Structures are given as C-alpha cells and as structure tokens.
Amino acid sequence: MRAVLLTGFGGPEKLEYREDVPDPHAGAGEVRVRVAATAINNTDVWTREGAYGSPDDPAASAGWRREPLRFPRVQGADVVGRVDEVGAGVPESRLGERVIVDPMLYTGGELELVTTDYLGSERDGGFAEYVTVPAQNAHAIDSALGDAELATFPTAYATAMRMLNRAEVRAGERIAVTGASGGVGSALIQLATARGAEVIAITSAAKRSQALELGAHDAVDRGSIDRVGEVDVVADVVAGPHFPALLRRLAPLGRYVVAGGIAGPVVETDLRTVYLRQLRLIGSSFGTHEDFAQLVGHITAGELRPLLAGTYPLRELRRAQEDFAAKAFFGKLVVTPC
C-alpha cells in the first residue's frame, strides 16, 4: 500500500513516501479501515521532532509519552473511512460501514488514559491507504459531512471536550480560550458555546472575525490579555510568557485547564496568585472514550461546524506538515490517500 513512514526524529525530511508498504490486516477484535481522510495535529509535528522531552531532560528527543519511539512509524490519528476487513470476533455486518476513529488505544478507566497508546504514535496510523484499529474504536457515523470535514474532529475536539469536562464548565460561566484559531481552540469555542458558556477568544487580530463567527462572545488580541476581564475558566493550549497574565484573569475559585504549550511549556508564575485566590490548576490531554462518544453525538446531531482549511494528497505530507507548522490558516489541514 501507499504510506508515509516517519523514519526517525527530525525535520520533514524524516517523512518518506512509499508505495510498497505491506498491507496491514485486522487481528482478533479489530477492523481494517480503508482510509478516506486523516487530519494533521500538533502531536504529529511534535512527535516527528521528538519535542516532548523526558521527565529528567526537557531537551531529550521522545514521543508524547516521553519515552523512546519505534521507527519506522506511520503517523496520523484522525481517521475517517470505511471498514473493509474484520478480524475474528467482529461481525461481518460491519463491512462497508463508514467510521470515524477514536485514536486513544486503551482499555479500562480514565487512569489508563495517562499511559495509553495513541494512533500514529505507538501504533501505525492513517497517513496510509489502510489502518487497523480495535473494533470499538471505529465509531459508525451517519453524517452529511464529507470525509475530510469529519476528519477535522477526532483529536482536537475530543481534547477540547476533555478540557471542558475536566474543568466542569457550566452554562452561564465565562471562559477564556487561547489559541482560538487552532484546532483545539476553535473546538473549545464551539463546544463551550454549546454548553451555554460565554467565550472570550484570544487570537490574532487577523483571525478575530472567524472566532466571532464560531460563537465567541468577544475576541481579544493575544498581546492584550489584560482586556479579557474576569473569567471563571481559562482553557489554554498556548502557555509561554502569557501564563501569569492568564492566571490573573481568573476569578476567585477559578479553574485553569491546560492541554498544550505551543508558546513554551516551561513557565513562571507567582504562586501567591494561586493560593490566595484558591485557583485550581488542571492538566488535561487526550479525550477519554466517553468524551469521544459524547463528541460523536454532537457530530451526528449536526451541532458542530467543521473547519477544513485545506487538503493535501498523501505524497505531499511533508509540505502539509510544513504549512501546518506555519499556522497561516484557521481550522484543520487534512491529508487524503489520492
């Protein structure tokens, strides 16, 4: 089959397009999906770069679990396609089913999520013609949206759902969202608004109108965080030097939930702000299976707007990742096999 192999940590040159990769086959309890579309995430780029560090060395090259990664690896977590092969124990009635894939590969409760395998990282993913996954991870989807549009949802929206659930965001609350033009940020705007929360989007002036169109109550330039006003929750995927200013925006008993550090993961703050205002600092990463099922419900009900910024053929994955890293777009970039 055609696939792009990640051959080691490094730049885009580590992505090798091949047309002779052996077809995978569904094992017991698994399905094989003929890939129709796979979206790009920050995790793809950071994993390729080995940018997660280790617990003892922030500069070490490692995958998202902060451990060594096996190469070659097919990346790509956000897969949409059709089931074309079933393994033992899986009903043949699933053949031909249109599916959207939950990329978190764990069993048991949410504690296992912290050490889970992730599609495209610990297991080959969707930057290929075929991918195999546990049958329960392939959710049947009934939607009028196109394949590339559906592929914009899995990781970003499930991550956003997890952040909102972890922070217990409720109707009537005010929530500041950083990185509002990115995949997780734009998902946070839509999902928080669907809960009845008032969203203040923090983004560039050039992308202010898009954030407002998604449902944000207001949009503030990232250089003017002090204009945000007091909020109940900060949902942050940027971190970096703005971290202290974000904490100062929180009302007493406010919650700060973080799922990324695009502007820098190592931050400084005055802990007196945390304990005197009795703030909660909440770490969050990928969504649970329950979060993903909740997301599929929103998609099926037509309550979310896909933000497809562009598509690329599989053979141009290098260029797609380079464009993704440049961040000159609003929404998601998607790769298709053809």
Image (cartoon, helix red, strand yellow):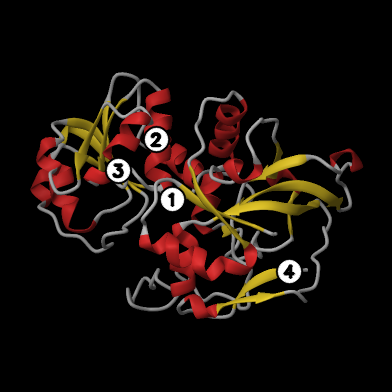
The residue wearing badge 4 is 2
Estimate the spatial distance between the alpha carbons at disc 2 and disc 4, rounded to whole Å.
38 Å
**C-alpha distance separating marks 3 and 4:** 36 Å
Q: Nearer the viewer, mark 1 or mark 4?
A: 4
Q: Circle 2 sits on which residue?
A: 164
Task: Say which residue label 1 marks.
Answer: 285
Residue 101: percent from left, percent from top: 65, 46
For the residues labelled 1 and 3, the Cα–Cα distance comes to 25 Å
Judge the density around disc 4: few (<14), some (14-19), many (≥20) Cα neighbours within 10 Å.
Answer: some
Question: Depth check: 73 or 40 in front?
Answer: 40
* Label 2: which secondary element: helix
Task: Give the residue pinned by disc 3.
Answer: 207
User: Residue shown at 43%/50% (left/top)?
Assistant: 285
- Mark 1–mark 4 contact, CB under 8 Å? no
Q: Amino acid at mark 4?
A: Arg
Whether residue 3 is situated above or below residue 186 in the rendered picture: below
Q: Is residue 309 above or below residue 174?
A: below
| Residue 282, percent from left and from top | 32, 45
